[in-house]
């Protein structure tokens, strides 16, 4: 027995509120409140924390009334079993219990669905962008966790059923999938919520006419002789502006003002991308992990001439690539969130994609400079909107509970409850994980409505670890897919992952094998 109902009433709190805080279903919370079911011990701690009461108060199990003969008042007597709530004792005992449970869960899955390990000599990791840096068009912009074009090509070749197949990437990024598809002769679509990557993908996938190339060549000549009298305003984010020296910032704003005057829209966009591409090289900061870091041996100021020189060499590369590229089919870049309802112009036969991993990486932070200087963010609300429409994969934003029922019960119950008892580096992590798998489930659901029969779907994902608990995203995603009506073709592991040294210490030897980057292949029935 518990005292949830009483405590909620005393604090004038509603069950729905508690449900939201816990990320559990209303039915389950109602079962607790009505004392039909009892939460596990870790969950009791979590609930006590949310309700701001001592766990003993919350679980002051059935109070017994004992009449004292020498006293007219009733005397309350607590049941003695509460001694077991010694957190230290309980955690030590429970951590192995939970970790064994999770390990057995994954192992059971792998027994019936063995993970195929892809040899490194056969294949580089699918999200190694290195190869893209040497390939025409792909090399225009480097993107975190961007696909290897070679991997995309191989996947399409392996699973195509006809030359008319439609390819789709629901997390399209800077368009590696659509560009490679168009080169191979497949029409392709891509969804993304990052306005910067969508813009880049669009420019890369564009069809350029001879006249555009002539205009671009002319523009190159104009820019080298231009006076740059006018100047744009700096972005309304002082931190971002401070990542450039005064001289460099001034030059950037003058070049920006010039780009705004270019008449040919395609040429204007290409020149603009050229500027976005060089921003990091002329900044005092560079991208690092989940943000930016001051450069050590930075050269200093970049004046107008130097910036124009960099810009022109970038434009030369664009001209060369456009001249030497032959898109056999076209691509469409859609700025849609893949967990919302959407309808592709044509249903897809091949899906190859890679969502953000549940690794706390925040695209809106790492690309902050380009997003602000590109005018994609004009105020803080734009950043908020971007995060809101992104897959829940980090802890820099407080998302509302959404897509309940699409996630995975192992995360929603055992792993969530357990992680909440730990002192993780961020309290939001357990909730983030629930949100992540809810979102992924919703994506698979919306995707299924846009698939032709027998369509093959490939998701490249990276597993993670929190508080020593391996989060096998590949297995969990596969199970969510199976639940939604997909068949599992198989899981292929491309790389073993190492976690941060702190996490590495916490993870048990027998659980390390679950840390990998893999491709989950599903088939729509
Ligand atoms: C790993 S990257 C994909 C990179 C891509 N494979 C490429 O080669 O450019 C993941 C992408 O998912 C996007 N994303 C996050 N949430 C999304 C959502 N709800 N709908 C569509 N895209 C989303 C991010 O903006 C990011 O561009």
Image (tube, helix red, strand yellow):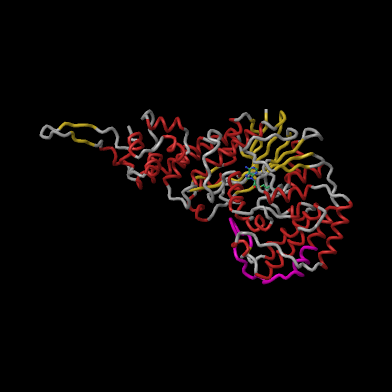
Quadrant of the snapshot with the C terminus: top right
Closest to the observer, 384 or 454: 384
Closest to the observer, 324 or 102: 324
Residue 220 in percent (x, y) is at: 83, 62
For the point 63% across and 35% down, which residue is it? 444
Closest to the observer, 251 or 111: 251
Q: Is residue 78 left or right of residue 24?
A: left
For the point 36% across and 30% down, which residue is it? 35
Q: Is residue 391 left or right of residue 125?
A: left
Q: Quadrant of residue 32?
A: top left
Q: Is residue 299 magenta?
A: yes
Quadrant of the snapshot with the N terminus: top left
Q: Residue furthest front?
A: 230
Give the magenta-colored segment's residue range.
Answer: 286-312
Q: How many marks?
A: 0
Against 279, residue 496 (above or below) is above
Residue 137 in percent (x, y) is at: 78, 52
Residue 40 in percent (x, y) is at: 40, 37
Q: Is residue 217 magenta?
A: no
For the point 84% across and 60% down, which residue is it? 219
Residue 520 in percent (x, y) is at: 64, 39
């Amino acid at each position: 027995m518990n005292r949830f109902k009483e405590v909620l009433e005393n604090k004038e709190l509603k069950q729905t509120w508690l449900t939201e805080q816990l990320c559990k279903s209303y039915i389950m919370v109602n079962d607790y409140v009505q004392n039909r079911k009892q939460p596990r011990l870790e969950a009791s701690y979590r609930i006590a924390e949310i309700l701001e009461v001592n766990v003993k108060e919350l679980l002051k199990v059935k109070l017994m009334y004992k009449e004292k003969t020498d006293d007219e008042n009733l005397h309350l007597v607590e049941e003695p079993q509460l001694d077991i709530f010694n957190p230290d004792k309980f955690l030590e005992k429970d951590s192995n219990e939970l970790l064994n449970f999770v390990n057995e869960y994954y192992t059971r899955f792998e027994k019936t669905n063995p993970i195929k390990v892809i040899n490194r000599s056969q294949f580089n990791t699918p999200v190694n962008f290195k190869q893209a840096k040497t390939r025409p068009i792909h090399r225009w912009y480097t993107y975190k966790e961007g696909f290897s074009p070679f991997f995309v090509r191989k996947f399409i070749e392996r699973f195509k059923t006809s030359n008319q197949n439609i390819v789709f990437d629901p997390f399209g990024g800077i368009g590696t999938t659509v560009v490679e598809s168009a080169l191979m002769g497949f029409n392709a679509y891509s969804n993304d919520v990052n306005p910067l990557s969508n813009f880049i993908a669009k420019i890369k996938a564009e069809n350029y006419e001879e006249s555009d190339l002539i205009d671009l060549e002319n523009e190159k000549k104009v820019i080298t002789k231009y006076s740059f009298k006018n100047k744009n305003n700096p972005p309304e984010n002082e931190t971002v502006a401070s990542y450039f020296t005064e001289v460099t910032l001034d030059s950037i704003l003058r070049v920006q003002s010039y780009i705004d005057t270019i008449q040919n829209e395609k040429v204007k966009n290409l020149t603009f991308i050229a500027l976005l591409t060089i921003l990091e090289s002329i900044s005092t900061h560079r991208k690092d992990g989940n943000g930016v870091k001051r450069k050590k041996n930075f050269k200093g100021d970049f004046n107008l001439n130097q910036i124009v020189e960099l810009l022109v060499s970038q434009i030369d590369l664009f001209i060369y690539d456009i001249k030497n590229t032959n898109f056999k089919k076209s691509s469409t870049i859609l700025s849609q969130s893949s967990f919302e309802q959407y309808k592709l112009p044509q249903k897809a036969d091949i899906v190859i994609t890679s969502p953000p991993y549940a690794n706390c990486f925040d695209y809106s932070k790492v690309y902050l400079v380009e997003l602000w200087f590109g005018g994609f963010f004009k105020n803080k609300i734009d950043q908020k909107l971007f995060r809101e429409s992104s897959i829940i994969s980090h802890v820099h934003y407080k998302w509302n509970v959404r897509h309940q029922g699409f996630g995975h019960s192992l995360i929603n119950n055992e792993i969530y409850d357990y992680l909440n008892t730990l002192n993780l580096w961020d309290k939001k992590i357990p909730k983030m994980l629930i949100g992540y798998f809810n979102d992924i489930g919703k994506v698979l659901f919306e995707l299924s409505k846009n698939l032709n029969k027998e369509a093959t779907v490939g998701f490249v994902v990276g597993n993670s670890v929190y508080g020593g608990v391996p989060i096998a995203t590949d297995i969990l995603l596969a199970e969510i897919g199976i639940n939604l009506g997909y068949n599992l073709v198989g899981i292929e592991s491309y790389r073993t992952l190492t976690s941060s040294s702190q996490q590495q210490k916490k993870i048990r030897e027998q659980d390390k094998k679950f840390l990998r980057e893999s491709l989950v292949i599903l088939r729509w029935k």
